[in-house]
Image: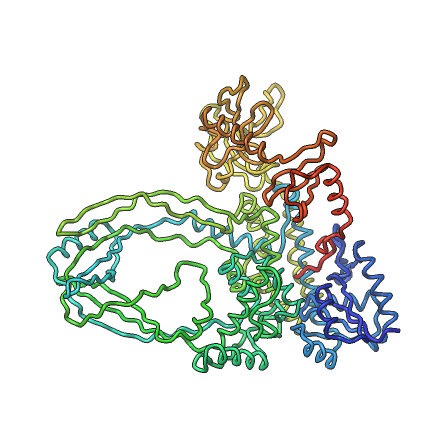
Amino acid sequence: MQKNLVIVESPAKAKTIEKFLGKDYSVMSSYGHIRDLKANEFSIDVEHGFKPEYVIPEDKMKVVTELKSAAKKSEQIWLASDEDREGEAISWHLSEVLNLDKKNSKRIVFHEITKDAILHAIETPREINEDLVNAQQARRILDRIVGFELSPILWRKVKPSLSAGRVQSVTVRLIVDREREINNFQAESFYNVTAAFILPDGSTALSAELNKKFKTKEEAEEFLEACKSANFNICDISKKPIRKTPAPPFTTSTLQQEAARKLGFPVSLTMNIAQKLYEAGLITYMRTDSVNLSNLALGTAKEAIVSTYGEEFYQFRTYHTTSKGAQEAHEAIRPTYISRSTIEGTKQEQLLYDLIRKRTIACQMADAELERTIVTISVSGRTEAFLAVGEVMQFEGFLKVYLEGKDDDSEEKNAGILPKVDIDDPLSLKSATAKQSFTKHPQRYTEASLVHKLEELGIGRPSTYAPTIQTILNRGYVVKGDKEGKERDVTALTLSHGKIKETTKVEKFDADFKKMLPTDMGFVVTDFLTSNFPDIIDYNFTATEEKDFDAIADGEKDWENTIADFYKRFHPVVVKTANTKTEHKAGERLLGNDPKSGKPVYVKIGRFGPVAQIGDAHTPAEGENDDKPTFAKLMKDQSIETITLEEALKLFDLPRTIGEFEGKEMVAAIGRFGPFIRHDGKFTSIPKAFSPLTITQEEAIQLIEDKRKQLANRTIKTFDEDSETEILNGRFGPYITSNKANYKIPKTVKDPASLTLEDCKKIIAEAAEKPASPRGRFTRKKS
């Protein structure tokens, strides 16, 4: 028999741990959960205390068999899954399925994969924490109840294949509510005055801004008129020391936010990379609410700071976790060895590691010290004054290493150094400009600001943010996209050489990039759920449920009673909503009547997306004409939320004959994937710059010819003896396509055009022999 068997969740983690343990230890991976609720069944026995019906998925049978065999041959089994609720549940499932005896099986936990941490864990084993397991089960069961009972109602009332989720639906609602705030926002105009002054020496200019904003152009003009004859003097100079303090070390959510801001990483990518860094033993556990650092980490951070920057840059700091409902009890995310400044790995892994290391070091560094100078300039005969602000860095402190990013444009910028001035210095006005500005609507969410909002409201937990965002994107309730800006006239009044000149420029505004935008489906599903299941997507209700899970984890609440209380309120509403008949489909919006036919015009969600509809669908009475409604697909930049009757009616002009090309008709229309031109049995997409309603014959011909050139350049090589196999140019370089499957061309091939059919078949055969990616296996899901 072998002495010790250590079971972890991932092969990468197993590989790292094996390096620290001797020949008496064998380390195996469970590849995440080995049991779960049945994929396509409810799997919860409501009548008997909501007992879950777990099964071993088919793709886990082999793993379970191997683990059972190894466990029987081992004297001691160590369950070493992650130190959180999900990890505790994995250990519990392993114990149940492998039929482990408590006498020779122990639970060990560690929040970093280092030799000291592993050996310490083995020296201090514990039992499986049933409360943590129950908290995980409660979340899993509650999510299954909500998903399985709500989704079929959405299929019937809105559209087939939709889904609802306890956390995902609330997250979509946040994005929908914000978009409606923006749509309803009324921008207000104001005028901001800036000026350039000449100092007494006649050679230096001083820029300043008025301490008042004017509501109207007339008020701004009246002020500039007064400036023509006014005297300007420096009436006050104030100097104020400013201290900036470093941000605490990373928690899961702050890492997700900062990696999005500074590195442009989606939340899911950040977590994938962090998982790899953790499993390689490079950082501490990446799912945590804690901002605490161990004494060892504090000591090594001090050594790194003092040796690199000097004693004056070091300042001992401790941080305490204050996030609502914090659940994890380990350290903040930090490097396992702070002295390690660089790592091997992919560019993304190196960037994320560097971010984590710099944040950890910066949090133990001295404050940055600045001196802010404010020069006040009086205007004779007026109560307003101009302010010139300058900043001088006195001591860099932690800014030598790191500055936290921001989600918006509110981050203060250093104003630079002001020229030397004295009180009562007279100034000459060189010019003053009153520029029209507008109040800004609330900002749309980025992935980073969305995570921040979820954390602020207490919705979800660190482990749920990434999968939740990915789910709402995959389901098509939200897209991460760009919003084209609009144009407006902006007026500026400039006083120079005693004259006021008015100019008007066209300004682009409200353009957004890579923001979370709700789709029509997101609007419709949110409205339906808000109307029929207000509790499910109520922010406070969802946050309260998280507190209930925390109470279960702490042994203060019974999980079965918690689920029963929820089900008692939830299920009757499900039954009532399912049996309620409505005249119109959910999300259907009446725009008005068609002036030609007098029939009503609606917009709604159709089988392939949002559509406009003229007329009602009904069964005709005897002798009545069966006038079926007509439909037109909305364009990509249109929404059922904001489209007007006039815009909807124009869609019925499609399909539209544009003209002829090469003796064949060109027709513009909108299809499932957007607007297109149909010509000679082929389809050419119409880009954003053109509209199918207005595109000209010349423009359409150009698009068709451009596509032909693109396709001609795409094909590198074809084979007469095998028409299914080709060598093509793709987005990421040349590749082989054969029988609707694509294959990478090895980097050793310098000239893809030189490949023969036999070479291609060899590459295809070698690709088939390679093992499947681990991602294709049944992987662990965090909840």
Left or right of 753, for residue 190: left
Name the colour scheme: rainbow
Q: Which residue: 88% across, 69% down?
A: 72
* As drawn, 262 above or below 574: below
Left or right of 423, for residue 611: right
Residue at far left of view: 229
One can see residue 302 in this view: yes
* As drawn, 429 above or below 667: below
Residue 584 spot, x, y in % from top left = 57, 37
Left or right of 461, for residue 432: left
Residue at far top of view: 663
Q: Which residue: 74% across, 53% down?
A: 42
Instruction: Determine the image quadrant of residue 681.
Output: top right
Q: Quadrant of the N terminus?
A: bottom right
Instruction: Determine the image quadrant of residue 36.
Output: bottom right
- Tally the marks: 0
One can see residue 133 in this view: no
Residue 43 spot, x, y in % from top left = 76, 55
Residue 649 spot, x, y in % from top left = 47, 29
Q: Which residue: 31% across, 66% down?
A: 416
Q: Which residue: 65% across, 49% down?
A: 747
* As drawn, 644 above or below 387: above
Residue 182 spot, x, y in % from top left = 43, 50
Q: Quadrant of the C terminus?
A: bottom right
Left or right of 261, for residue 528: right
In the image shown, does 131 or 118 lie closer to the viewer? 118
